[in-house]
Image (cartoon, rainbow, N blue to C red):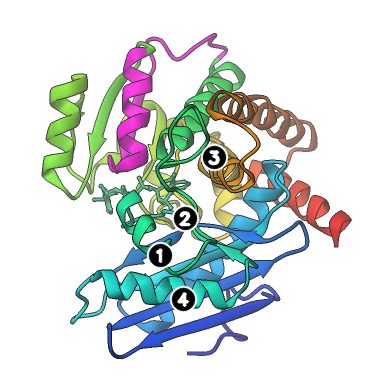
Amino acid sequence: MSVFTDTAFDDHERVLFCSDAKTGLQAIIAIHSTALGPAAGGCRMWNYASDAEALHDVLRLSQGMSYKNAMAGLHFGGGKAVIMKTSDFNGSDALFERFGNFVDTLNGDYITAEDVGMTVQIMQTIARTTKHVTGLPTAGGKAGGDPSPKTAFGIFCGIEAAARFKLDRHDVSGLSVAVQGVGHVGYHLCKLLVEAGASLKVADIDDARVQRICDEFGATGVAPDEILYQSVDVLAPCALGAILNRTTIPKLQTAIIAGGANNQLETLEDGQRLADAGILYAPDYVINGGGIINVACEYDGDIGDEGVTQLVAEIGPRLTGIFEEAARKGEPTNVIADAQARQIIAAAD
Ligand code: NAD
């Protein structure tokens, strides 16, 4: 395993390996860029096959956060953490407190929050040992708490924008949407879509989660290995990354891809593959920026929940701008978004 030769290494400013035998903590924190401000990004807890896989993931995810924060108009740079669920992982409070100690050694250069596998309760435990943590419960209309409802709302706004652009539709009423992964983000997205009159096909490796969506929202459950290939208007990936690649793209039967998962494209070229297939792709780090906008406002403490909703709604027009520029230049949407993000970061550097 090598940091500098990993294909996801992009001149990251800092990578911190966190190990504590007493609690069994094994984690990696990557700070990609602090050009725009402190590096903000969630912590993912996952069962990685190897250290190398965890490193690759955190390098990719932290770069994605730099781009995401830039495109969301935030004065935050990009960072991310991963906690490895090793074979003897016990998820004790002591482990999360120890993780908080490591976050604290970075003196606010990295601010953590929820990502896959984490909960508000775990964030509260981490907050015992560092103040550089968000996603904590709040009251009285303040920004904060689980960011996934705001992430879902941003994706919903993005789906509306994509449907207007690609399908000439005023709203999502009557659209068919396939949702891969109905955890925190997927659940809230399904709720918004059904309330707006869309029909749903859903899949998750956790059957109980699928059942809940079917019971509550009248969705149709689909096998996890079939969800990507449904004939639908919109495919919303809301599980893990790299699901859009040379193997899956030729089999897709959707007009639009607009979902919350980070790093949906396995490689940059997959954006071109989607464009060649006539599929409109909403760049993941633009459409799923609602959660980090919530996190940033919670950290700053100066904007309430309603103000956050207004900021998140801007994701729709932002995506429309990317779709239009991509169409004008004949380039894939991911290339346009990357160029815009890099320009914002370079201007601040
Ligand atoms: P989560 O852990 O609550 O939900 C993920 C769901 O995906 C789980 O239910 C899991 O069982 C399911 N899943 C995993 N592999 C699957 C597979 N192969 N097929 C079908 N389902 C599968 O996580 P979340 O917070 O909902 O995040 C979902 C995605 O959105 C992640 O990629 C995350 O990085 C991204 N994201 C989340 C937020 C947020 O606010 N939580 C913000 C931005 C981006």
Identify the mark nearer the N-term, 4 or 2. 4
Of the two numbered discs 3 and 4 in the rendering, the one whose residue sits closer to the viewer: 4
- Dot 4 surroundings within 10 Å: few (below 14), some, or many (20 or more)? some
Kind of residue at badge 3: Asn
Identify the mark nearer the N-term, 3 or 4. 4
Q: Pointer 3 and pointer 4: residues touching (CB < 8 Å)?
A: no
User: Which residue is depicted at the point 34% across and 62% down?
Assistant: 125
Q: Quadrant for residue 78, please give it.
A: bottom right
- Residue 6 in the image, given as x and y percentages of width and height: 56, 81
Which residue carries the number 4 mark?
101
Identify the mark nearer the N-term, 1 or 4. 4
Of the two numbered discs 1 and 3 in the rendering, the one whose residue sits closer to the viewer: 1
Q: Pointer 4 and pointer 2: residues touching (CB < 8 Å)?
A: no
- Residue 347 in the image, given as x and y percentages of width and height: 88, 55
Q: In this picture, which residue range is highlighted in magenta?
A: 168-195
Task: Tell me the CA gap for discs 2 and 1.
Answer: 14 Å
**Numbered label attached to residue 294:** 3
Which residue carries the number 1 mark?
128
Q: Is mark 4 within 8 Å of ligand 1?
A: no
Q: Secondary structure at mark 4?
A: helix
User: Which residue is depicted at the point 22% across and 77% down?
Assistant: 89
**Numbered label attached to residue 113:** 2
> Does 93 sit above or below residue 26?
above
Q: Secondary structure at mark 2?
A: loop
Identify the mark nearer the N-term, 2 or 3. 2
**Nearer the observer, 274 or 40:** 40
